[in-house]
Image: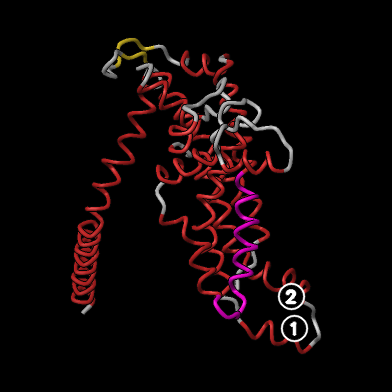
Amino acid sequence: MQSSRSELQDVFMKQKRKTRRKNFIKGIMFLLPSIILFSLFLFYPMIKTLYLSFFLTDMAGTPTVFVGLDNYIQLYTSDIFRKSFISTFLFVLYIVPTSIIIALFLAVLANEKLKGVGLFRTMYSSTMGISVAAGSIFWMYLFNPSMGLLNEALGVIGIDSIGWLTDPDWALIAISLTTIWMNIGFTFLILLGGLQSIDQSLYENANIEGAGYFRKLFQITVPMLSPTLFFVLVVTIINAFQTFGQIDILTKGGPQYETNLIVYSIYREAFVNRQFGPASAQAVVLFVIILIMTVVQFKFAERKVHYQ
């Protein structure tokens, strides 16, 4: 009797292991397309970039001389890269809070139940449908030193024309304005969706208690919107560090390397100067910066998030 029971247990365990193995294989088969795509377009480029960062390469990008950490040491001592580093953080500082504040203001307005508000929602989100190239060309005409609308407006109020894209003091600000305008549509839509998901009974209870508009805004809207704000903050910072298109079209990293952000510096080092080793080292540095910034946000900023 005892032996037959143990035999049944053995059969049951074998059957269970067999079922687990089948489920595991099925799961791998479902994940296989994603694994292949991630391996080809994410993991392999990351490993190859890290590998190339320890080498000097020829014009075709083939490693020729192992230099260890020399590429990273040269970045540390390079005045141009130091300027790119500072410009990148200034750029992020300019566009992230400004984009979120403007988009939040517009989302709060568009969330009001007013006649014709759908038209304004379409207008505010319309930049999502404009490519970086088209948007950059549009702003190029606005920044034109002789016939640009911005300088004409300044002339009306008696202010001298500004070399928006040629003056080192203004070029980074001009690129920041362009990027803020391009980012607002996406940020606005995400925040508007977050506002519309807030339970309206909270506002009804606040009205019964006689709460004013700003009290409801700061004690209900902002706390309940905090998960969406946190998501927007993380995504906006990552996108800011990866900005490329408008710089390539408007300034080419100039003047005097003022808009030579790290992403554009990587592009120029790799595909203009054909120095793939130093470019890979810059790419690794940028990856580490974004990783640290993201971890810090999840470590500290997420504590302020109020999940429903």
> Which residue type does callout 2 highlight?
Lys
Q: Which residues are magenta?
A: 95-116
Is 120 in the magenta? no
> Which residue type does callout 1 highlight?
Ala
Q: Residue at x 50, y 49 (%)?
A: 182
Vertical comparison of 142 with 253: above or below? below
User: Residue 206: which disc?
Assistant: 1
Q: Residue at x 33, y 39 (%)?
A: 43
Q: Secondary structure at mark 1?
A: helix
Q: Which residue is mark 2?
A: 216
Residue 238 is situated, as x and y percent measured from the top left of the image, at 51, 45
Q: Nearer the viewer, residue 223 or 19?
A: 223
Q: Secondary structure at mark 2?
A: helix
Residues under numbered marks 1 and 2 in contact, where contact means CB atoms less than 8 Å apart:
yes
Q: Quadrant of residue 279?
A: top left
Relative to 68, 308 lies left or right: right
Vertical comparison of 118 with 124: above or below? below
Q: Residue at x 47, y 44 (%)?
A: 138
Q: Nearer the viewer, residue 90 or 226?
A: 90
Vertical comparison of 27 with 293: above or below? below
Label 2 Cα neighbours within 10 Å, binned few <14 / some 14-19 / many ≥20: some
Q: Assign the C terminus to one quadrant of the image.
A: bottom right
Q: Nearer the viewer, residue 10 or 32?
A: 32
Is 111 in the magenta? yes
Q: Residue at x 63, y 57 (%)?
A: 102
Residue 283 is situated, as x and y percent measured from the top left of the image, at 44, 29
Label 1 Cα neighbours within 10 Å, binned few <14 / some 14-19 / many ≥20: some
